Amino acid sequence: MRDRVVRAFSFGVPVLPRQNRVDPFGLVHAVPERGLFMGNRGGCFHRDNQTLKDRRWASQQWIICVLSFKDRRRALMQPGLYTELFFLDEASALAAGHRPCFECRRPEAKAFRDGLVRTGHLAAGERIGALDAKSAGEIQDVLTRKSDRETIWPASLPDGAFYAADGRAWLKYRGEARAWSFAGYGRPQGLHAAGERLTPRISCEALRAGYQPILHNSVMT
């Protein structure tokens, strides 16, 4: 996979981080690290006091956005407005069930969709909701325990996909495994013999079709 690695930005660390940082399992945490991307889950799922409701999404429209777009500025977690989320990098966001935004990341969103159409995993002209049902929908079913994660051979995954083993999330990158954390990736290790696929099947197919997610710069260490 051709490298698309960018440097992390530095942000001031709040005394009490909001619970809006997402891991590759699709779970939401309160940690200081913000990461390279923001996004949302189709609307508001926080209360006026900025705590989260029991269900951690508003719809199946789970998107990945840039941190800055057209000089727009907004206060986070405003009452009644969508709940802002943050991700270490794009591969982490894909694993959590999100896909590129068609407004602020339109070229990436088109590349993601077009690869799926080209390989027959999405019908030409099919509405984006069909993609959301397969990406966010898969993770929603896992989080609500309607389905289990698939046990896989990690070597069979495309580069940029995540799997779980030994209680941790691992990125497959250049045929090796990188342990994930909110601060970045660990040093390369051999792939596990077996694991549970984290990245939704449809997003894995987009990666196989040539989509190249932006990765945190720690994959280069």
Image: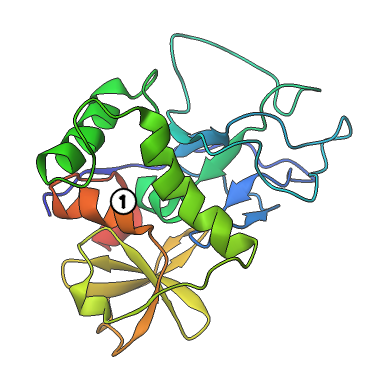
Residue 180, x across and y down, in percent? 44, 66
Is residue 99 visible in the rendered structure shown here? Answer: no
Q: Residue 89: image x %, image y %?
A: 40, 47
Q: Amino acid at mark 1?
A: Ser
| Residue 85 placement: quadrant | top right
| Frontmost residue, 39 versus 12 | 39
Quarter of the image with the N terminus is bottom left
Give the colour scheme of this rendering: rainbow
Farthest-out residue, right: 49
Q: Residue furthest bottom?
A: 193
**Label 1 Cα neighbours within 10 Å, binned few <14 / some 14-19 / many ≥20:** many
Q: Is residue 99 above or below residue 138?
A: above
Location of residue 187 with respect to 27 vertically, above or below = below
Residue occupied by mark 1: 203
**Element on which disc 1 rests:** helix
Specify the quadrant of the image occupied by residue 213. Answer: top left
Give x and y (percent) for residue 145.
Answer: 62, 68
Decide if residue 48 is on the left or right side of residue 142. right
